[in-house]
Amino acid sequence: MDISRRAQKLEPSVTLAAAAKANALKAEGKDILSLTVGEPDFTTPKNIQQAAINAIKSGKASYYTPSAGIKELREAVVKHIETYYQLRYQTKNVIITDGAKFALYLLFQAVLNPNDEVIIPVPYWVSYGEQVKLAEGVPVFISCAQEKEFKVTVEQLEEAKTEKTKLLILNSPSNPTGMIYSEAELRKIGEWAVLNNVLIVSDDIYGRLVYNGADFTPIATLSEAIQKQTIIINGVSKSYAMTGWRIGYAVGAEAIISAMNDIASQSTSNPTAVSQYAAIEALVGEQDTVEFMRQAFEARLNEIYPLFAALPGFKLEKPHGAFYLFPNIKETLTMCGYTDVTKWVDDLLAEAQVALVTGAGFGAPENIRISYATDLETLKEAAKRMALFIEKKSTRAIF
């Protein structure tokens, strides 16, 4: 049987592929240090676990829910947005989805027509472009210089804009770079989007994971006009250590949310019931564990950043949020006799047993992504192994 053209054109997720390869080698008994997946190494907080257990015991988790999510969870999202964004929405402006990733998928399916263009700053999260293509849209990638913290400018947006431009994706704090746009930078971008009637897709999934005094500014908060032009994408995976629970959400214009709901009703029917009850507790329950985890990530960043920044040939900006390092290793590749970053990453895994993610999947073929969402001992040992690998390869490259 023939496979659809859309499926044949789809690029697999480099992050999931790297993690799967690392896990397979671990299963063989190899001593693999995996710095691949963007997944907190903490277990879901106890109060959230208990909320799920209570929902199961009461029988509430046994049945279908509305496709947009249970009312109580949508109300919790409204309250959460009001608390952290100081913005008022109604439950009709909220849809609960099977992870923030599916919220993005539904959004693109709901608003894109064939050949509509979506501006995506580079580096980008690996699924943005592929999901746009699945909706028959056209991803328009804009390269953002590392020297300017990988941030897109209004001048670049203006140059990339055409009559087919429909969406702009913004991810701050960013996966994979960890950079954060300032309020002034976001205001300029937001005003440009309003002027040009471009819908802003604001991926805020790392908004509560910021470090060393950095501030997260949600673009939707900057003016009423910008708010109306913005769809907020978020979820409980990163801040609450709930990646496996698969609960995300989108907040925005009623017409768009309604269209997303219609598509969800014909695809997943509804998000997992028990996960929804757990997510209510995450959003409205005690938040001390969120701050505990944030502080732990901050401490790791401050301790391991100098180790990786000192690796030969690495050019690395210290991130302000999320939990990734994204060094440019062009000089390292040259020193080690490589021309391809993916080959370097593959050999690092095979010879030093350190698993990273190639930057090629993020649109940055001179970079690698290192997740520091793991323990300090693993991170320090990984840095040592990488240093030895570079030294070994550099010696061979010279002779």
Image (cartoon, helix red, strand yellow):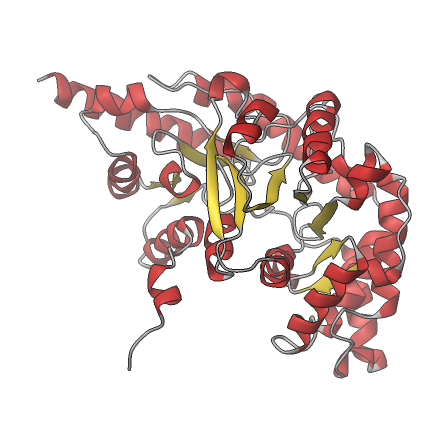
Residue situated in front as seen by the camera: 314 or 144? 144
Work out which quarter of the rendered image holds the N terminus and state it: bottom left
Residue situated in front as seen by the camera: 299 or 31? 299
**Residue 257 pos. (x, y %):** 75, 61
Please say whether residue 167 is visible from this viewpoint.
yes
**Residue 373 pos. (x, y %):** 56, 40
Residue situated in front as seen by the camera: 266 or 212? 266
Q: Quadrant of residue 388?
A: top left
Kindly identify the residue that appears in the image at 30 percent across and 42 percent down.
Answer: 349
Please say whether residue 286 is visible from this viewpoint.
no
Work out which quarter of the rendered image holds the C terminus and state it: top left
**Residue 2 pos. (x, y %):** 29, 78
Q: Quadrant of residue 346?
A: top left
77 with respect to 145 (left or right) = right
Kindly identify the residue that appears in the image at 56 percent across and 30 percent down.
Answer: 157
Kindly identify the residue that appears in the image at 70 percent across and 74 percent down.
Answer: 270
Above or below for 197 versus 25:
above
Residue situated in front as seen by the camera: 140 or 143? 140
Above or below for 158 versus 395:
below
**Residue 134 pos. (x, y %):** 47, 61
Above or below for 31 versus 319:
below
Q: Quadrant of residue 392?
A: top left
